[in-house]
Image (tube, grey):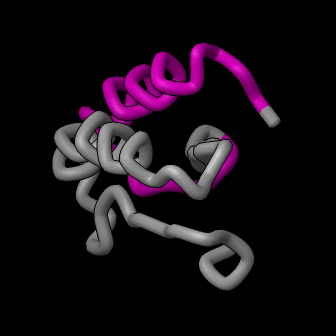
Amino acid sequence: MKDKVRYYRDLSETGDCVEAIHLVYDFLRWAETKTDCSHVLLADLKSLDLIESEHLEALFDRLFRAASGKRA
């Protein structure tokens, strides 16, 4: 979807779950500075086949909380 959105950020370009956990809120704060956007879309990672990691549930939890439990 990179070519369909105004701004795009990867939580981790290497797929590192721990890096993504640490960057979620930083990226959301960054998104708040964009005055020409009205929505932030977060990937539904639960629907993807991801490599198992002991940290996946923590990442899912942060994304769920960041989205206030809403799905589009």
Q: Nearer the viewer, residue 23 or 15?
A: 23
* Residue 70 position by quadrant: top right
Residue in front for this viewpoint, 41 or 62: 41
x, y percent for residue 59: 36, 33
Quick check: 58 left or right of 67? left
Quadrant for residue 62, please give it: top left
Residue at the location (73% across, 76% down)? 4
Q: For the N terminus, give its image quadrant.
A: bottom right
Percent coordinates x, y for residue 58 in the rendering: 32, 25
The front one of 30 and 14 is 30
Q: Seen in the image, is 27 located left or right of residue 61?
A: left
Q: Which residues are magenta?
A: 47-71
Residue at 37% x, 47% y: name it: 33
Residue at left 31%, top 39%? 29
Residue 55 on the magenta span: yes
Residue 43 belongs to the span the image colors magenta:
no
Residue 48 screen position, x and y as percent: 63, 53
- The relative height of residue 37 versus residue 68 in the rendered view (above or below) is below
Q: Is residue 69 left or right of residue 8?
A: right
Judged from this view, the residue extending furthest toward the right is 72
